[in-house]
Amino acid sequence: MTFWKSPSFKTLQRAWYQRLEEEGFQDAEELIGGELMLRQIASHAYRDMGEIEISTKESYYRLLGRSVQVESFQNDVDRLILTMFAEGAKLKHIGEALEQNGKGRCRNTIRFTIRKYEMRWGLREYTPSQLNRKG
């Protein structure tokens, strides 16, 4: 067992973050469910983007969400992956949800599944190597 996963380390970590909070320190990360997560405000996602980039990103996710609703899938796992991704879930959280359903997939498999449907629906283009295929 690595030291940062040990119960004594977790206890010390919680105590340290509690002390920092009591002293008014605002950390860029916070402990959520025993895991450090980067604090993010809604506007942070668009921090260094111009109006065109913001509009394009929003349009992409709206189109992706519509595609998930109307298109057919090879299986239920693919549908869950694309549904969660269209809702903004990170690959890590998609993997955790699949694991809880007994259908675990690694992040790369999830990434390649997303790319496969993006290509099929004409949303993005990828090279064969980006799709984990030989040229």
Image: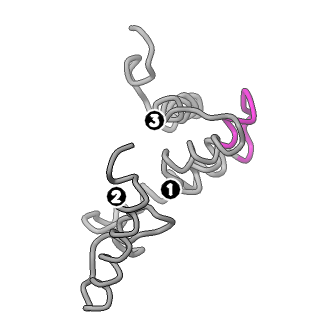
Badge number at residue 124: 3
Q: Which residue is mark 1?
A: 59
In the displayed structure image, the side of residue 65 where residue 74 appears, left or right: right
Query: Start and end of the magenta stretch?
Result: 69-80
Q: Position of residue 45 (x, y in %)?
A: 37, 65
Examine the structure image and report whether residue 93 is included in the region drawn in magenta: no
Q: Secondary structure at mark 2?
A: helix
Q: Position of residue 75 (x, y in %)?
A: 74, 30
Q: What is the quadrant of the C terminus in the image?
A: top left
- Badge count: 3
For the residues marked 1 and 2, what is the alpha-carbon distance in whole angstroms?
10 Å
Q: Are marks 3 and 1 in contact (CB under 8 Å)?
A: no
Q: Residue at x 54, y 50 (%)?
A: 93
Q: Residue at x 45, y 35 (%)?
A: 124
Q: Which residue is mark 2?
A: 53
Going by the numbered disc 3, the residue's amino acid type is Arg
